[in-house]
Image (cartoon, rainbow, N blue to C red):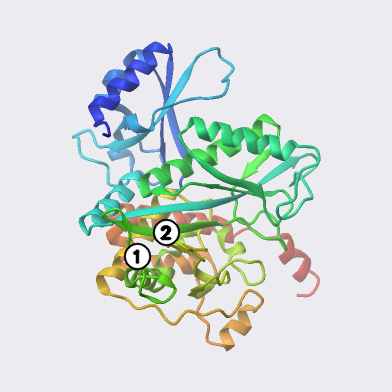
Amino acid sequence: MSMNRDEKIEEVLKTIKEKEIEFATLEFTDINGIIKSFGVTTGRIESILKEGEHFDGSSITGYGSIEESDMVAIPDPFTFHEIPWDMGNGLDECAFLCDIYEPDGKRYAGDPRYILQKIAEEAKKMGYEFMCAPELEFFILKEEESIEPRDMRGYFEADPHLIDEQMRKEIAYYAKEYGIEIETLHHEVAEGQSEIDFKYDTALKTANHTVWLKMLVKVVAAQYDYIATFMPKPFQNVNGSGMHVHQSLWKEGKNAFYSKTNENNLSQVAKHFIGGQLKYAKEMAAVLCSWPNSYKRLVPGYEAPVYLGWGFKNRSSLIRVPNYTSEKGARCEIRCPDPAGNPYLQLAVLLATGLEGIKQKIEPPEPSDVNVYKLSTKEMKKRGIEALPANLYEALMEFEKSDLMKKVFGEKTFRNFLWAKLEEFDKYRVVISDWEFERYVRKL
């Protein structure tokens, strides 16, 4: 039998007392997915767990203006974890993820965690539980005269010096201390690139785990004097880092994506879910791929999906239905998200668009097994193949027109996200790249 909140608080307080933990970090994310935190001593942790801790939110990206700066962080006791590495200060420390409230006790509408919780509650009212798991790709880099890949290995290659293996083991060890079950860790296609996969769970837990894992990867890399980055495309002419998300809906303990009678054992619910995500793919692209650099990855030729279609086993489509042999394994995998964004918002829009497909009974197009990885943008255009937006600005224009995205985010947070990302794109587009200089300075 699961604990209620009060019981969990008592368990946490007992652990803190028994282990003489002296310091706690309260964590949350801004609208971009960057972890924000502040520390408190555990002498006050009981009242903080019950009443929260006030902080100034005016300087948190996406959290509002100076006139509405007062906010309250209330730790989620179910996210309690001890810090498993030595912080160098001799203190035992712990941390919590927090829900953000306004001073009057209302949930803060701009809290990305709350946005996901609301959509998950909507799914629950429809009888569904959203289960998902991301594949997190990242680069480990070394900084000498320049920043470059730490190694020269490729897909699934072993490390003869055992440094990669040691780092991966430490990531897995720390993840276990955070309650995250790692399934695989391996080298990816590009030099210096790795992937980490963990067991699927509910949307909120999966988003929590994603936030923590991104932090843990960076911690371990830093302990070895390396840089870990989830930047989607740090190097040109090589594969970028994606975050493929495996998704399914469960109802009354059974996988609603599975059907014994339908072709490929894929249910009509699953097809409508896929239909919804394809219909709203352009509108949610700015959330799934939320940085200017994201669209350097989403180009033909580098195993990145830009084609708005779906298929069985087809890795070049936006949505792929993998092989599965049992009810438990029935799922679809969306391949355009990248690991640089806010996982709470990313999972929120994925669930919302899928639910919309079910509500509207949106039929997806016929599945395709055509490999479009090698087609250029011009060739795709000639064939009438529809694609994701080509850059962040195009994606933001689709986002701005979307009634569904406005509903998911809420009016104020919708505007905050749009404005923050437009500002980011403005900073990006005034920069003159080396490519532009070398290509045009003598020619024009």
Quick one: label 1, few (<14), some, or many (20+) residues within 10 Å?
many
Which corner quadrant of the image does residue 45 belong to? Answer: top left
Mark 2 is on which residue type?
Answer: Gln
Horizontal and vertical percent position of residue 375: 64, 79
**Going by the image, does 49 lie left or right of 325?**
left
**In which quadrant is the N terminus drawn?**
top left
**Which residue in the protein does label 1 denote?**
354
Asked whether 3 or 276 is in front, the reply is: 3
Horizontal and vertical percent position of residue 334: 48, 63
The tag earlier along the polypeptide, 1 or 2, is 2
Mark 1 is on which residue type?
Answer: Gly
Which corner quadrant of the image does residue 170 belong to? Answer: top right
Q: Are marks 1 and 2 in contact (CB under 8 Å)?
A: yes
**Which residue in the protein does label 2 denote?**
247
Asked whether 197 or 406 is in front, the reply is: 197
Q: Tell me if I can see residue 385 in this picture.
A: yes
Height in image: 395 above or below 64? Answer: below
Q: Residue at x 29, y 34 (%)?
A: 71
Q: CA distance from mark 1 to mark 2?
A: 10 Å
